[in-house]
Amino acid sequence: MVRGIQARISVRPARGRLIDEPPLLLCNGIGASLEALQPLVDALDPDRGVVRFDVPGVGGSPVPPFPYPITGLSSWVTALMAKLGHRRFDVFGLSWGGGLAQQLALQSRRRVRRLVLVATGTGTLMVPAHPRVLVKMLTPRRHRDPAYAASIAAAIYGGGMRGDPIRGADLLHATTRAGPKRGYYYQLVAMAGWSSLPFLGLIRQPTLVMGGDDDPIIPAANPRMQAWLIPSATLHLYHGGHLAILSEAEELAPVIETFLNERSLNEQSLDEESLNEESLNEESQNEETTR
């Protein structure tokens, strides 16, 4: 429990050569439980630490008593990572989770080391999907009805789902857990009126922006815009749709691994700032103890 709110989490500890590296926090798409990210987790370096969680009200996490703004959820996630013992971490955000990831990078810049944005936009100010796609995103039905999910997978997910829509339904239903409908609507409310567009230039972290060339939900103009506006961004456009990071994880995970294994002068500076801050906090605590 963090700040009075329960959450279901999954932690894969780092090991081997990556044991001292920050873990990768995975922020999922709307309405999806942490199991949906398993194909990506399996394709990442097995030595990399990975943290997944069900957003409050989704999957196995109970519905919170009230809706939450994305800024509040970002603060809560940072507190969750601190409770797990992680002062610094990398963040991956897919679709809806990419909005949370962008907010985390801005709001907790000393905690977030690197940022990976996949098939995500900038909120209310972005190049929108076609209205026929958006209207299907307004309800959680695709997460609760496998037959319905298969019937719309080609239209809303694009890419490989156009030839194999059953695969799209399987990604959402084979192992995932559907939470209460209210949790899905809370996620919609959290992003209402929010946009990262005004602050993209303030994101200091090295950022990998990934997007598909056949993504009906997030047109490719959006990752291009993000990569152009974020100062230290790298753009990787791939051939595929909205869920390619899961359906083609073996091909795309190495792109993420290469990015996470890089190191920049800016990161070294942030690491030093973080260490200095922690040293000051420890000195302050020691002084209080002495008194």
Image (cartoon, grey):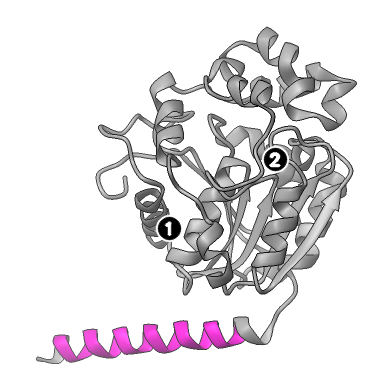
Please give the label number shown on residue 218. Answer: 2
Looking at the image, which is closer to me, 283 or 211? 211
Q: Which disc is residue 84 wearing?
A: 1
Q: Which residue is pictured at 39% across the width and 48% down the height? A: 73
Secondary element type, mark 2? loop
Task: List x then y, in percent, for residue 267.
Answer: 61, 81
- Can residue 218 be seen here? yes
Which SS type dominates the magenta stretch?
helix
Question: Does residue 148 sit above or below 3 in this rendering?
Answer: above
| 271 inside magenta stretch | yes
Residue 164, compared with residue 281, is above or below; it is above
The amino acid on which the numbered mark 1 sits, given as a three-letter code, is: Leu
Q: Earlier in the sequence, mark 1 or mark 2?
A: 1
276 within the magenta span: yes
Q: Residues within 10 Å of mark 1 (few under 14, many from 20)?
A: few
Span shown in magenta: 268-288
Is residue 259 found left or right of 182 in the rendered image?
right
**Which numbered mark, 1 or 2, is in the foreground of this view?**
2
